Structure formats: C-alpha cells, structure tokens
Image (cartoon, rainbow, N blue to C red):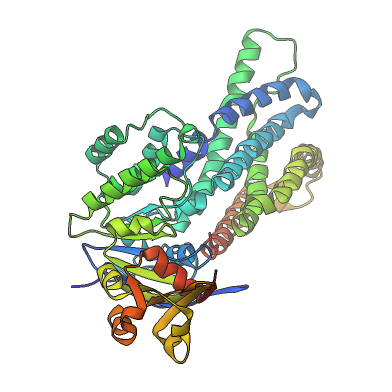
C-alpha cells in the first residue's frame, strides 16, 4: 500500500514543486487571511496534489493496471486517503519552512505563524473536503467527479478561515458568558469533534470502498 | 491434472452486447489462441478473468481456484500484457518497476535485470518516451519478472511492426518450453497463432464458436473451390461459409475428406489458414 502512496507523489513530481511555489506566492497574495492563513494554504496545497494524482490515474487508465496486480481494492482506496494526509504533512512542513526563512531574512510581509488552532482547522477542513470528494471519485472516476472537487475546494478555501475566525470570536464570548458547561469545556468539545471526524472519515472510507469494489474497468 | 484456466458458462450482459455462456479450458504447457473479430468479446472475457469486470454468471477457476475468492494469490502467479499501455507515462521504467516489484511475492530481480538487458530498455527513460514496441516489451518484462505461471495477453501484437512481433512470438515459444506455464493469447491477427498456438478458440458476437487443437483444425478443415453448379441441392450443408463470384464459389468445410468423397475431382480442396477459418465462421454467407 505504501508503494501506492509513493506512486501518488512520483507521478506528479513537477506538481509537488508547483504546490510549494503556490504556497509561497499565497503568503504574499492573501495577507488578509490572518491567523487562519495556513488553513487556506493547506487546503489549496492538498487540492492541487490530490486533483493531479486522481487526474493522472484516470489519464493513464491506471485502475486497469493496478487491479490486474496482486493488490486488494481496499488498499487502493486506503492509499488515496493516506496520500491526502501525506500531502497535508508536506504542506505543514513547507509552511513552517517558509515562515522561518522569511522571518530570518526579515522580509517585509506579515507572516502568520503556524498555530495549533490553524493546524487543527486545516486538518479538519482537508479531512471533510476529501472525505466528501473521495467517495464521489471512487464511484464515478475523476472526469465526472472533478466539478464536485472544484466546488468543495472553493467552498473550503474561502469559507473555512472566515468561519473559524467567527467561531473563535464567538468562542471567547461564550467562554466569558459561561453559557453551557459543554461548550465551556474546550477539552470535551475537542474530544467530541475529534470523534465526529473519525466517524465521518470512517464512513467516507467505507463508502469509497463499497463504490470501488463495484467499479468495472 | 487440473487445468491452469477453466471457464464454465461465463456470462456478461451489456447494452447491445452479451457474452453468452463461454466455456474454455487451458492446460499447463500450452498456448491457447483466442481469436475473433473486433468487438467479438475477447477483451471482455479477459477482463472478466482478471476481475476487472463483474460476471453475471458462470465460473472461472485459475490454478484450480475461484478467481475472486483467491484473487491476490492467483494474481501473484499471473503476468498480463494488454493491447495498450496502462502504466504511468510520467514515470521512468525504473520508477514503474520500483512501484510494482514489491507487490509481487515472487518478484525475481535477477530475471528483471536479464530482460532489461535483453530487451535493451533504457531504465531512466520515461514510459511516454518509449515506442509502442518498447512499451509492449516493458509490459512483457514485468509479466516475466515474477515467475508467472499463466500469461494473459490481450492483443499484444496489435500495432507492432513485423520484427517486434516476430521477437515476441519467439520469446513466447521459449517461455512455453517450461511445461508448468501456459499462455492465453487473444488476437485478431491470426497469423501470429499459425506459428505458436497449440489450441485455438474462436469467439464471435459473444458466443464461442469452437475451441480445438490447432493441428486438428488445419488438418480436418478445408478450403473448397469449385463451380457454382455444385451448390445445387443439399451441397451447402457441407460448408460453414460460402463465397460466390461470377466464376464459381469458395467455401470452408469442417471435414475435407467428406467433401472429397462427395464431390471428387469437381472441387479443389486446399489447406485453410486460421484467418480463412475465422473469416468463414464470422461471415457465414459471403459474396464476392
């Protein structure tokens, strides 16, 4: 299965480089995104690499080849989900590297440091975006599903940072007002959120698997 | 001895086409040529064997085991060569091998190195930069580098020049010297099979018309030529397909001895090629 993840990187070496350049440019272009800048950058980075890997799979009719090899279909599906988090890890490392480099040379732009909140927001947004997209992709293939991916990307790219900032502001008010014990407890909220995300991704994976097992090539 | 490949009553329905209960058997040590015109159902049958399509009925056993229940185990022992390139064109030969090799339990790196030299394949060249012949050689090299016992080839010679085709056929003849292996070779270029096939199966419109030993076909079948007057009465029953022109007729018979006995010197009986047999079977009534 690991080979299939590496394959997703190898087939798009040029696009990996492009994704890093895109992230670098984004730092200058979206100065107004403030604290949740990383979230948008990560969503964009993952979108580029996921889209390209799916497009190359379809262009090369790779499903015919891969499913003629001794590979289980569940491994093909799981590898794509794992690839998404590998792309996210690369985005995180890239962002950290750019932040440090631009800070060291004292470049005259605002660098928003990678915070735990912005990383979690990025992680959640990427998970939901791909968790919604991949079942559609495994059901219909890339050509028919790319519009879904495109809509999801734009939705998440622009909406998530705005929502997160609103929630953050609202969260402060809630905390100050002590409205409910559940929402007051950040720990309980995070545990519930994390559990919800795991269930969501599990269902997404199962759905993808059901669709892919029934696909014909 | 269990057949390497056994297909019984294989059915698959599509809009406007169906595979109608195919029965095929391939024993160890033999090459089965699977012939038929384009759209006859050759690729569909192969895709069903490889579980790339879901069958609607019937049974497929490979190495004596159900092809879905033991899919991974079976695919470890199958080498495939398809009619077009399905490898990632963006990758180099080495990168593609590097991804595929660990997936096979029986990958033989020495064999791979032997074939890469034999086929003169540049390891650092991208697959999209390879010629069609080179791409086919690469597919074959992957198929041969994990000691596959069954080679499944779907029109591997289509679009290749005569030199590469000849090289491929020679190589297949070498491979089949190992009597534990078998080759399932689909093609519409029947001349490829004249040289190497042991058995020939003909499919047309999703129906298997026959599956016989090649020598039996070529020895018993006959291409009959004669005057039109012979076709009067029940003579047509002796023939599979008849082609008529202003000078006479040409037809295929399953039993050339019967025709010789019946018509004597009135007809000329020649040995048919596999192409003649395919043509007459698939175009029953021909008029020149």
Q: Is residue A143 above or below residue A120?
A: below
Question: Would you identify the image quadrant in which residue B203 lies?
Answer: bottom left
**Which residue is at a point 24% across and 43% down the rendered structure image?**
B108
What percent of the width, then of the height, locates residue B215? 25, 68
**Residue at the limit of the structure toward the top, as seen here:** A105
Looking at the rendered image, the quarter that the C terminus of chain B falls into is: bottom right
Instruction: Give the total number of marks visible in the rendering.
Output: 0
User: Which of these two is toward me, A214 or A176?
Assistant: A214
What percent of the width, then of the height, locates residue B154? 42, 57
User: Along the horizontal axis of the image, is A217 left or right of A165?
Assistant: left
Q: Is residue B142 above or below residue B69?
A: above
What percent of the width, then of the height, locates residue B164? 36, 42
Looking at the rendered image, the quarter that the N terminus of chain B falls into is: bottom left
Question: Would you identify the image quadrant in which residue B116 lies?
Answer: top left
User: Along the horizontal axis of the image, is B187 left or right of B215?
Assistant: right
**Which residue is at a point 41% across and 62% down the rendered structure image?**
B50
Q: Is residue B190 above or below residue A24?
A: below
User: Which of these two is toward me, A148 or A35?
Assistant: A148
User: Which of these two is toward me, A20 or B163?
Assistant: B163
**Which residue is at a point 69% across and 54% down the rendered structure image?**
A144
Q: Is residue B105 visible?
A: no
Q: Is residue A55 above or below residue A112?
A: below
Question: Would you identify the image quadrant in which residue A43 lies?
Answer: top right
């Amino acid at each position: 299965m690991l080979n299939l993840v590496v394959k997703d990187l190898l087939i798009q070496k040029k696009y990996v480089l492009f994704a890093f350049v895109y992230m670098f440019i984004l730092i200058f272009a979206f100065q107004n995104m403030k604290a949740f800048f990383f979230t948008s950058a990560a969503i964009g980075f993952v979108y580029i690499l996921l889209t390209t890997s799916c497009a190359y799979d379809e262009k090369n009719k790779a499903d015919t080849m891969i499913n003629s090899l001794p590979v289980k279909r569940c491994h093909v599906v799981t590898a794509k989900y794992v690839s998404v988090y590998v792309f996210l890890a690369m985005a995180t490392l890239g962002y950290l590297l750019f932040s440090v480099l631009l800070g060291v040379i004292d470049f005259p732009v605002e660098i928003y440091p990678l915070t735990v909140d912005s990383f979690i927001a990025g992680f959640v947004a990427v998970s939901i975006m791909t968790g919604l997209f991949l079942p559609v992709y495994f059901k219909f293939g890339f050509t028919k599903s790319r519009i879904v991916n495109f809509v999801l990307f734009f939705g998440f790219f622009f909406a998530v940072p705005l929502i997160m900032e609103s929630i953050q502001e609202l969260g402060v008010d809630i905390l100050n007002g002590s409205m409910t014990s559940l929402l007051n407890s950040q720990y309980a909220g995070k545990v519930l959120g994390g559990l919800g995300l795991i269930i969501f991704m599990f269902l997404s994976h199962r759905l993808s698997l059901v669709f892919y097992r029934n696909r014909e090539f | 001895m269990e057949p390497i490949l056994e297909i019984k009553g294989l059915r698959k329905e599509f809009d406007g086409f169906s595979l109608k209960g195919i029965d095929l058997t391939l024993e160890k040590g033999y090459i089965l040529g699977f012939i038929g015109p384009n759209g006859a159902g050759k690729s569909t049958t192969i895709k069903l064997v490889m579980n790339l399509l879901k069958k609607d009925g019937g049974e497929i056993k490979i190495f004596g085991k159900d092809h879905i229940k033991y899919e991974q185990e079976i695919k470890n022992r199958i080498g495939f060569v398809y009619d077009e390139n399905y490898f990632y064109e963006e990758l180099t030969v080495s990168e593609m091998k590097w991804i595929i090799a660990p997936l096979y339990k029986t990958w033989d790196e020495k064999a791979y190195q032997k074939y890469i030299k034999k086929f003169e394949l540049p390891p650092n060249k991208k697959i999209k930069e390879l010629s069609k012949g080179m791409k086919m050689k690469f597919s074959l090299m992957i198929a041969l580098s994990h000691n596959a016992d069954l080679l499944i080839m779907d029109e591997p010679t289509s679009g290749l020049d005569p030199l590469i085709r000849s090289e491929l056929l020679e190589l297949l003849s070498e491979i089949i010297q190992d009597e534990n292996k078998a080759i399932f070779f689909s093609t519409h270029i029947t001349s490829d099979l004249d040289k190497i096939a042991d058995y020939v199966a003909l499919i047309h419109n999703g129906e298997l018309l026959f599956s016989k030993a090649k020598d039996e076909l070529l020895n018993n079948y006959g291409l009959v030529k004669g005057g039109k007057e012979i076709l009067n009465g029940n003579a047509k029953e002796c023939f599979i397909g008849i082609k008529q022109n202003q000078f006479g007729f040409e037809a295929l018979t399953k039993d050339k001895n019967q025709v010789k006995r019946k018509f004597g010197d009135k007809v000329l009986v020649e040995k048919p090629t596999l192409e003649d047999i395919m043509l007459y079977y698939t175009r029953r009534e021909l008029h020149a």
